[in-house]
Amino acid sequence: MLQLILKTNDMSVLKVVEILGNSTESWEDSVDQVVKEASKTIKNIKSVYIQDMQVIVKDNKITEYRVNTKVTFGILD
């Protein structure tokens, strides 16, 4: 088994915010919307964790995809 260990003297501090996103197209588009909107005010986004997913159904058809996400980003100096 090969194990890679990276050593660094830099300590990083990350912050997590919860953001809801929606789309009439797809799950992927709803997450894209979260990143697109969040990046307008949040810099240095590292990851997006999808905490919860749901759909809105009207007349037996999916009309909206919704995601509850946690966006992680680095704190800038």
Image: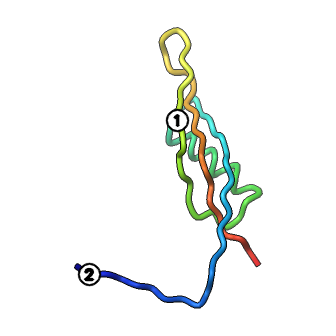
Q: In the picture, which quadrant includes the C terminus?
A: bottom right
Q: Residues within 10 Å of mark 1 (few under 14, many from 20)?
A: some
On screen, residue 29 above or below 61: below
**Residue topped by disc 1:** 53
User: Which residue lies at the image location 52% right of the left edge and 35% below the top edge?
Assistant: 53
Q: In the picture, which quadrant includes the N terminus?
A: bottom left
Total marks placed:
2
User: Which residue lies at the image location 63% right of the left edge and 46% below the top edge?
Assistant: 34
| Residue lying farthest to the left in this orientation | 1
Residue 16: image x %, image y %?
66, 58
On screen, residue 60 above or below 67: above
Residue 70: image x %, image y %?
61, 51
Residues at marks 2 and 1 touching, judged by CB atoms closer than 8 Å? no
User: Which residue lies at the image location 54% right of the left edge and 39% below the top edge?
Assistant: 52
On screen, residue 67 above or below 10: above
Figure quadrant of residue 10? bottom right
Residue 4: image x %, image y %?
36, 83
Q: Secondary structure at mark 1?
A: strand
Disc 2 marks which amino acid?
Leu
Q: Which mark, residue 69?
A: none
Q: Give the image's coloring scheme.
A: rainbow
Q: Secondary structure at mark 2?
A: loop
Figure quadrant of residue 24? top right
User: Which residue lies at the image location 59% right of the left edge and 46% below the top edge?
Assistant: 69
Q: Is residue 13 left or right of residue 63?
A: right
Q: Which mark, residue 2?
A: 2
Q: Residues within 10 Å of mark 2 (few under 14, many from 20)?
A: few
Residue 44: image x %, image y %?
66, 67
Figure quadrant of residue 12? bottom right
Q: Is residue 3 left or right of residue 20?
A: left
Which badge, 2 or 1, is on the more N-terminal residue?
2
